Amino acid sequence: MGGNYFAQAAVYLIEIVFGLYILAVLLRFLLARVRADFYNPLSQFLVKITNPAIKPLRRLIPGYLGIDWPSIILLMFFQSLEILLISLATIGTIPAPPGLFVLTVANLLQTVIYVHLFIIIIQVVISWVNPGAYNPLTVIMYQLSEPILKPARRLIPPAGGFDWSPLVVLIIMNLMLILLVSPLMDLGRRLSL
């Protein structure tokens, strides 16, 4: 009985430590994709904490076609390691490689969607509470969400003084979680056995 509590505590710590670092690397990757302000304090912080792992990879693997492959490989590595450690802590076995790969991709897709969901919701709340607010965090949030919201704004013009594009994007992202990420997770679990 007591071992189950230790396994739960281990899983919790693994998820927190790996989740925070994966989030930092993912945000760095996304900020580079949207060409966010490198001198923003948040960008500087992310570069500082992720450089020790990314710099050595950059010497071995260059970016190609404008994609930061070292960041992607680092994300895949840490997400796979997190899944492996959680599997060992909970069921005591290592997932099969095909299942591990599918679970890694599914978890990273889920994290990307959750990051964008969170950013869009926070931006909507800020626009209601303090419209036109400017600080380094709101600039970063705008730079990350604009590539997703801009196409939706073209399709759905503001009506009644409201911008409905965040609502449409939130619905589409939740559908992606249901129709894409969940089936991938199920497939990964089946392939892991």
Image (cartoon, rainbow, N blue to C red):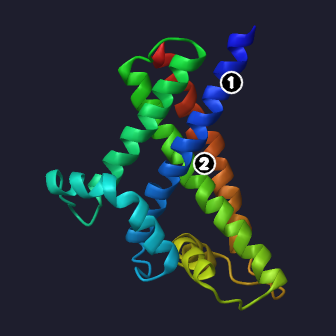
In front of the other: label 1 or label 2? 1
Q: Residue at x 42, y 40 (%)?
A: 78
**Residue most extreme to the top:** 1
- Farthest residue, direction left: 60
Q: Relative to residue 16, is residue 29 depicted above or below?
A: below
Foreground pick, 132 / 57: 57
In the image, residue 60 sits, relative to residue 125, either above or below, namely above
- Residue drawn at point x = 71 percent, y = 89 percent: 133
Mark 2, secondary structure of its residue: helix
How much space separates mark 1 and mark 2, taking CA atoms?
Answer: 29 Å
Q: Position of residue 145 (x, y in %)?
A: 57, 72
Answer left or right for 118 relative to 107: right
Front position in the image: 50 or 119: 50
Three-letter residue code for mark 1: Gln
Please report whichever mark, 1 or 2, sits nearer to the chain's N-terminal start: 1
Instruction: Report which residue position mark 2 lands on.
Output: 176
User: 54 or 61, which is in the foreground?
Assistant: 54
